């Protein structure tokens, strides 16, 4: 993957910071273990799903960090991409994959703002400081770095000083954006959650039928596999098989069958 000169500089900065000894440690604070080199990650489409999806989707992922071994921070190259590749978090089985930023610049802005993309990240804006309880979780590990006795209060001061140093060094190579600009830039790319749902529906289609749909009869079999639709409020936003998401997926992925009497009858039946 060819990164822009700017993206290369930002990635090098993250790699260098991670290789140095810091209290404001990226792995500790953001759960990001930065790779020394960019790595193509074919496993997501080849191994995450029951079916090898690489022949159905011309998407490529290049990882630059793990998320504590539970996921991968990656550049997402998709068909017709005209700008820099956005940053996505590829979750392991059972997790939710999502887009984090429109590019590496914006991701570092999120780190500086401390906009949470990590369940363990509780801090607020850049001028906030970690709570006593948050520092206490790291205290024993941090105290081992000092020969003399050190208090949690001193750790707090050192942490904030190091965090400001991270910001100062980052601002020499990034364009600092506010939260609204970061979100606006994300909207310029396709919705990655929707893309993951396309992976899921293609996986179901080929898994159930052993081939791609070629007739209304085969489409009917696929609908049968989705008959037990969870249309409750519980976890509705994340249920792939909610009635709302099945309808959206059929409309987007199978437009030839969306207007069919078969599917219209199916919708009426499941909306009752």
Image: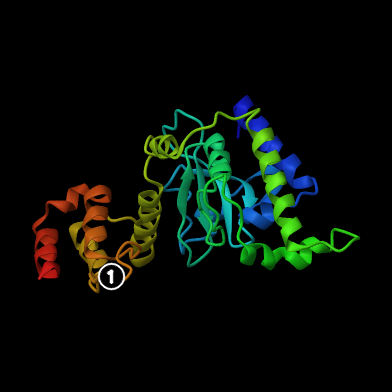
Q: Quadrant of the C terminus?
A: bottom left
Pick the residue in front: 9 or 169.
169
Residue bearing mark 1:
225
Q: Nearer the viewer, residue 260 or 177?
A: 177
- Image height of 245 relative to 126, above or below: below
Regarding residue 24, the answer to whether it shows in the image is no
Q: Position of residue 149 (x, y in %)?
A: 86, 64
The N terminus lies in quadrant: top right
Q: Is residue 205 left or right of residue 155?
A: left
Structural crowding at the residue carrying mark 1, measured as other residues with C-alpha within 10 Å and reported as few (<14), some (14–19) or many (≥20): few
Looking at the image, how many numbered discs can be counted on the residues? 1
Residue placed most toward the observer, 229 or 181: 181
At which x and y percent is residue 54? 48, 49
In the image, what residue occupies the spot 62% across and 67% down? Answer: 133
Question: Relative to residue 171, is residue 146 depicted above or below?
Answer: below
The answer to whether residue 120 of the structure is visible from this angle is yes
The percent position of residue 121, horizontal first and vertical second, equals 56, 57
* Left or right: 16 in relation to 241: right
Taking the view exactly as shown, the residue that stands out farthest to the right is 147
């Amino acid at each position: 993957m060819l990164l822009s000169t700017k993206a290369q500089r930002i990635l090098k900065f993250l790699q260098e910071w991670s290789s140095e000894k810091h209290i404001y440690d990226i792995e500790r604070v953001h759960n990001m273990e930065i790779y020394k080199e960019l790595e193509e990650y074919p496993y997501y489409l080849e191994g995450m799903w029951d079916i090898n999806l690489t022949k159905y989707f011309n998407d490529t992922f290049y990882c630059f960090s793990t998320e504590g071994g539970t996921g991968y921070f990656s550049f997402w190259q998709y068909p017709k991409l005209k700008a820099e590749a956005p940053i996505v978090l590829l979750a392991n089985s059972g997790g939710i994959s999502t887009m984090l930023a429109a590019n590496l610049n914006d991701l570092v802005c999120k780190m500086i703002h401390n906009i949470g993309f990590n369940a363990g990240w509780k801090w607020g804006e850049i001028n906030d400081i970690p709570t006593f309880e948050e520092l206490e979780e790291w205290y024993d590990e941090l105290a081992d770095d000092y020969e003399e006795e050190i208090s949690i209060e001193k750790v707090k001061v050192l942490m904030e000083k190091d965090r400001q140093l991270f910001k100062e060094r980052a601002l020499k190579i990034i364009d600092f954006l506010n939260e609204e600009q970061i979100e606006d830039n994300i909207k310029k790319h396709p919705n990655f959650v929707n893309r993951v749902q396309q992976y899921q529906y293609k996986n179901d289609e080929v898994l159930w039928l052993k081939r791609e749909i070629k007739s209304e009869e085969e489409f009917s079999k696929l609908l049968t596999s989705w008959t037990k639709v969870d249309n409750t409020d519980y976890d509705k936003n994340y249920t792939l098989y909610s009635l709302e998401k099945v309808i959206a997926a059929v409309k987007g992925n199978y437009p030839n069958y969306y207007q069919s009497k078969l599917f219209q009858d199916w919708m009426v039946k499941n909306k009752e």
